[in-house]
Image: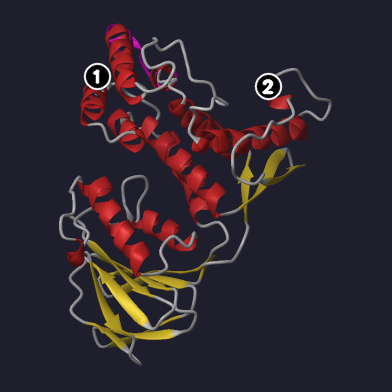
């Protein structure tokens, strides 16, 4: 068990402390929750008591499968004095967020700890392991060669899940298996289970009762806007890369002019070829970053064979999650290429820290 807690300075001269988060609060992708807190701070999703209350309640349900009855127990608050004292730290990790607009001083187990404005400090017990300062407005992320493909593929898989193309899960796992023997033995059963999950999750759509060969369509009025926004980002990234690699053009979908349909503003994207490498610089805002981070998270679960984890993102329905757990167990024992998950997590860190400065 790796426990943790959030400390937050707001703009009104008050600081707040969350209740203790119970496990997996370390800094490691995809299952450590520390990077989720860092991302929420950098995207300005954690700025005040209301934000912290909502985040903590959601975290208990999402991370620990625990509903909160008494919200008063979630967050404690204190008047901001000249020096805030945090004594006897018992948490493995403490995440201290300064949204006050000015420098503050903490007193952590007899040591002064200065935290600048727009800065976050991560402690492992009383030891500082990271200081991050967030930027403002739009941000840039540079991806090189395979990293571009990973991001585009993650966005593609993410929006396909919203339109009901669950056969993409099975197909993607098959492509990275070392041996296909166990895969073939359970293929028919898995397909029927995926259809059962979809009949629950998409029961209110036009394809709820169809088999896996049907899909909702990316531009359907019934399609979640996150899918459309994901597809918008994907289109622009693959279009820019395609013409950078092949300026003469081509006939594949990559060369088609992007059709933007989501609610988010269009990303900026520049692509250059340097020493036989393609470098793509993507200019995004916090909403784009959230979509890209979620897509990469789901993509990492796919390559970990964590089907239940994937569907826990898309539905709260207990029956759908239970069936997903059965599918999960059917993939156990199938060997895969493990290094690809590390590559996904490397790209995800770039998205999380976009626009931020690592101070120490």
On screen, residue 259 above or below 137: above
Question: Residue 35: x and y, percent?
Answer: 39, 55
Mark toward the start of the polypeptide (2 vs 1): 2
For the N terminus, the quadrant is bottom left
Q: Which residue is mark 2?
A: 253
Side (left or right) of 232 relative to 189: right
Taking the spot 32% from the left edge, 23% from the top edge, the residue there is 335
Question: In what element is the residue under mark 1?
Answer: helix
Q: Which residue is mark 1?
A: 330
On screen, residue 5 above or below 278: below
Where is residue 120, by image quadrant?
Answer: bottom left
Side (left or right) of 80 relative to 358: left
Taking the spot 75% from the left edge, 17% from the top edge, the residue there is 251
Question: Residue 331: x and y, percent?
Answer: 28, 21
Question: In what element is the residue under mark 2?
Answer: helix
Where is residue 152, by image quadrant?
Answer: top right
The range drawn in magenta is 174-186
Side (left or right) of 351 relative to 15: right
Q: CA distance from mark 2 to mark 1?
A: 34 Å
On screen, residue 17 above or below 35: below
Residue 339 visible to the viewer = no
Number of other residues with Cα within 10 Å of mark 1, as a class: few under 14, some 14 to 19, many 20 or more: some
Question: Residue 245: x and y, percent?
Answer: 75, 32
Q: Is residue 176 magenta?
A: yes
Q: Is residue 260 magenta?
A: no
């Amino acid at each position: 068990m790796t426990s943790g807690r959030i400390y937050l300075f707001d703009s009104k001269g008050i600081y707040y402390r969350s209740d203790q988060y119970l496990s997996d609060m370390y800094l490691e992708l995809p299952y450590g929750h520390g990077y989720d807190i860092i991302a929420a701070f950098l995207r300005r999703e954690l700025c005040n008591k209301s934000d912290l209350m909502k985040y903590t309640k959601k975290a208990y349900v999402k991370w620990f499968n625990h509903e909160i009855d008494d919200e008063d127990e979630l967050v404690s608050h204190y008047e901001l004095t000249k020096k805030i004292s945090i004594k006897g730290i018992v948490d493995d990790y403490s995440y201290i967020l300064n949204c006050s607009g000015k420098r503050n001083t903490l007193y952590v187990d007899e040591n002064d700890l200065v935290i600048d404005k727009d800065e976050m400090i991560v402690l492992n017990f009383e030891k500082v392991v990271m200081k991050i300062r967030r930027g403002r407005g739009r941000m840039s992320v540079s991806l090189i060669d395979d990293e571009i493909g990973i991001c585009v593929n993650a966005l593609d898989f993410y929006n396909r899940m919203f339109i009901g193309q669950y056969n993409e899960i099975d197909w993607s796992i098959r492509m990275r298996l070392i041996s296909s023997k166990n895969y073939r033995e359970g293929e028919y059963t898995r397909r029927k289970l995926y259809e059962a999950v979809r009949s629950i999750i998409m029961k209110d759509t036009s394809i709820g009762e169809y088999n896996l060969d049907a899909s909702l369509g990316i531009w359907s009025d019934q399609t979640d806007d996150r899918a459309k926004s994901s597809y918008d980002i994907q289109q622009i990234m693959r279009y820019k890369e395609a013409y950078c690699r092949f300026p003469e053009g081509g006939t594949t979908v990559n060369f088609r002019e992007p059709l933007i349909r989501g609610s988010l503003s269009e990303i900026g994207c520049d692509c250059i070829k340097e020493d036989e490498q393609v470098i793509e610089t993507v200019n995004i805002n916090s909403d784009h970053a959230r979509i890209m981070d979620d897509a990469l998270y789901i993509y990492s679960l796919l390559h970990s064979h964590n089907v239940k984890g994937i569907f826990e993102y898309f539905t709260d329905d207990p029956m759908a999650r239970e069936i997903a757990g059965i599918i999960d167990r059917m993939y156990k024992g199938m060997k895969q290429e493990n290094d690809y998950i590390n590559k996904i997590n490397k790209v995800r860190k770039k998205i999380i820290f976009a626009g931020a400065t690592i101070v120490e």
